[in-house]
Amino acid sequence: MSARIVNLVVNGSRKGMIAYPETTLLTGLREALGLMGTKRGCAQGACGSCTVLLDGEPVVSCLVPALVVDGSSVQTIEGLADGNDLNDLQQAFLDGFATQCGFCTPGMIMSAEALLARNPDPTLEDVNEAISGNVCRCTGYERIVSAILDGAHRRRTRAAATASPEDRDALSPAPQPTEATS
Amino acid sequence: MARINPIDTEYFKDERTSDFNVIGTTVQRSDARGHVTGRTVFFEDMMLPDLAFVKMHRSSRHHAMIVDVDLSQARQVPGVLRVITHADVPQNWYTVLRLIGVEPNDEPVLAEDRVLYLGEPIVAIVADTEAAAIEGAAQVKVTYSDLPIVLDVEEALAEGAPVIKQAGTNYFVYEGHHARRIRFGDVEKGFAAADHLFEWRYSSAPIEHAPTETTGCIVIPQGGGRLQIHSNTQAAFFTLDNTALILDRPFTDLQVKGGTVGGGFGGKVDVMVEPVACIAATLINRPVKFVYTREEEMQVSSPRAAERIYIKDGVMNDGRIVARKVMLYVDAGAYSRHTPYGTTKAAAHLPGPYTIPNVYADCHCVYTNRTPSSAMRGFGVTIADFALESQMDRIARALDIDPLQFRLRNAYRDGDLKAHRKIASGTALIEVIQRAAALVGHDLPEEYRAMSSSTPRGA
């Protein structure tokens, strides 16, 4: 089977890439589009380093054939910051020392983005569940979990600050206690 | 940051300076911004349209003579560009630590007439695509004649065991000796005078680092013939120097770019992919990538060595250890890598941070037909510590002594003569135990709270 063009919207921009039957969404993003923030850890769906959002859902991009996602929208780590301004989760990872070697970080943040998109106020258990497919071999999980809870709180606080007064209470409940990681 | 206990400045007050301007403050990691934005550049993060791929055909036997290698089918796989054997490696025999004087060169880059472990590299395939390289490697046909295998450190040293190493012994030779040895005082006299004898055996399994980023490199031939090596090695200069020696080319022909490692933990200090990738890149004059699959990372990258440790202690009724004998065996696997050094580290660590007047130890670096082991976080020391501190707990339990008090009674202090005939200085075990006891609410009697590393024993 020969190469075909796959059309995507990546981080809001229209992109076309050449794909072969064996091209995965991971290798397409990296080798055809040059988006190197998405990492190849195991190439067998076990480590989560290649997690991206495909039409809003977290997927391990190493297991997604590029040819079947024609027309989809993809969000990667490169699309989160606004210029030099980090988003809430990125800033929380930075401030909370939640990175070590950095290789799992993009996948970890994308899994966390997916969590916050469906649940802006996650519990500790929700966070553990959301990143259960992401391996950090530097074993920095405690700080990663704390950073995700912190990022969620920052995002709720910011949303409340820009919301109408009657929506504020609903948007910004008290911060999550984090004793379980202390 | 509330998890971190504040620094207790009461300890070693006299030795502290007051002008610390970093300790005690929070400093942002310089690489974190790259990590959270996906902009950190790892070795694999580059677009190279004419990139070729290396895959390895590996031994399916633990120990065997190679009778025949049939490359005809591999060469016919569409996309295969070159087939590389030991004949293509200018200086095939090496050992990583020859750079610091370790010998002999005991490992071939690619196997010649025999294999010593399951997964040993034999033939490298260079191909246009990763799929073609995988298929090419699968089409290499090797005929073996099996040899007896040794998979246990003590069996490897037993009389009549098959000798697996061409140097003639199943152990690394330390300055003419079968082991790295410690002889201090008279351990048998110590045992004879002791009120109690305790002897236990400890063992550990190999441990794989399993970094999320697997071992790999990309080699890009430059216009003038130099080779640019993008690697995730933890040891850029080991890689540069060993690769140059293997290629038999001047060091100045090579440029190693790296330092960004997606998890290493000691697992990326051997020189495993760069030499073959350099040979491949030179042969085809194109950029080449050689990166381990997850299966290779688990099966053939060097783990932490398995160890077996016997500790025999002579102890007095009052809890003083008067003699300690340690027989320690480190499983190097089939080749030396960093294990002769790790075994020396184990010897250097004995008998633990305790002052014991009679010490005897033999630390063996043993070869078996297992995956070669190498560096991993505190290698040599970590498993020895597991054994030593387990021994301390078991003795304390057997004598019904508080385990912290038992350690404090034997803790080394400044001015003590260690088994290596070095005077201990800068010791802090006593203070660390006192502080740890206080933090967990473990009450120590006054005489133990009054102990100090800087007060000589018995003063």
Image (cartoon, rainbow, N blue to C red):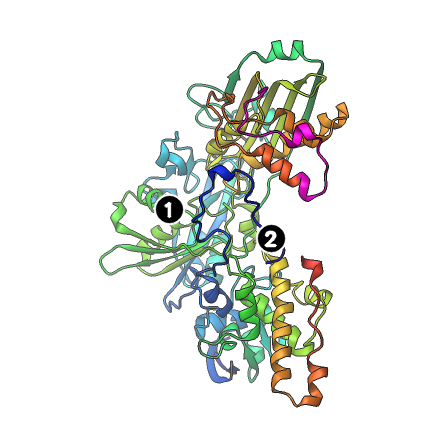
- Chain on which label 1 sits: B
Which residue is at 59% across, 28% downward? Answer: B153
Front position among marks 1 and 2: 2
Q: Main secondary structure of the magenta part?
A: loop
Specify the quadrant of the image occupied by residue B319. top right
- Coordinates of residue B26 in the picture (x, y in percent): 50, 58
Badge 1 amino acid: Thr
Residue situated in front as seen by the camera: B156 or A182: A182
Judged from the image, the secondary structure of the residue bearing numbered disc 2 is loop
Q: Is residue A143 magenta?
A: no
Residue at x-position 46% and y-position 40% = B68
Q: Are marks 1 and 2 on the same chain?
A: yes
Location of the C terminus of chain A (image quadrant): bottom right
Q: CA distance from mark 1 to mark 2?
A: 38 Å
Return the mark for residue B445. none
> What stretch of residues is rendered in magenta?
B437-459
**Picture disc at residue B4:** 2
Q: Which residue is mark 1?
A: B239
Q: Position of residue B392 (x, y in %)?
A: 67, 28
- B456 falls in the magenta region: yes
Give the side of residue B359 with respect to residue B281, left or right.
right
